[in-house]
Image (cartoon, grey):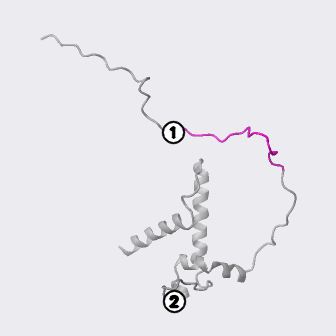
Amino acid sequence: MQSGLLLEHTFRFCKQVLGWDAPLLRDPAAADRWTWLVIAAYTQLRLAAPLAADLRLPWQRPQDPDAMTPARVRRGFRAVCGTVCYPAAPPRSSRPGPGRPKGSKNKHKAPRPPVGKTRPKRANRAKPKPRTKQPS
């Protein structure tokens, strides 16, 4: 019973804080990629728990670094980023890429999937046949 409660809190944290359900994605593959990004962010918060400072709210008790929740790690994550070395140099700024010129209309609109209505409209529906009395 305890593990089910922890799982529900994990889903709630991923949806409300990490924005799992925030983007409106049209493609199922994009939704899968977004889910993996959220999982990676959650894993990063879990792994950074020993490094993060406990920035607690006034009414919260101090916690051990090993038992910190992902929400508390998120509060102190800015300090962790300063202590960790980066594997690559920061990107250099350059001129903007060849995008669509300002003022021109979008020629390649995103595909819109059907809404999924299953019943036809009332005007197109077949009219019911009148009942006739059966001879006895």
Sequence-wise, the earlier of marks 2 and 1 is 2
Compared with residue 98, is residue 48 higher up or lower down, i.e. above or below? below
Q: In which quarter of the image is residue 21?
A: bottom right
Q: Quadrant of the C terminus?
A: top left
Residue identifier under label 2: 62
Task: Name the residue carrying label 1.
Answer: 115
Residue drawn where x is 54% and y is 86% of the image: 66
Q: Which amino acid type is marked by label 2?
A: Pro
SS class, disc 2 = loop
* Place of residue 39 in the rendered image (x, y in percent of width and height, measured from the top left): 57, 66
Determine whether, in the image, residue 80 is placed left or right of residue 12. right
Q: What is the magenta segment's predominant secondary structure?
A: loop
* Magenta-drawn segment: 98-114
- The span from disc 2 to disc 1 (Cα, nearest Å) is 50 Å
Across and down, in percent, residue 18 comes to 57, 66
Badge 1 density bin: few <14, some 14–19, many ≥20, Cα 10 Å: few
Q: In which quarter of the image is residue 134?
A: top left
Q: Relative to 53, does residue 113 appear above or below in the rendering? A: above
71 with respect to 89 (left or right): left
> Mark 1: which secondary structure?
loop
**For the residue marked with disc 1, what is the amino acid?**
Val
In the rendered view, does 68 fall on the left or right side of 121? right
Residue at x 54%, y 37% (from the top left corner): 114
Q: Which residue is drawn at 60% across and 69% down?
A: 41
**How many residues crowd mark 2 within 10 Å: few (<14), some (14–19), many (20+)?**
few
Residue 72 coordinates in the image, percent (x, y): 55, 79
Residue 113 on the magenta segment:
yes
Farthest-out residue, right = 95
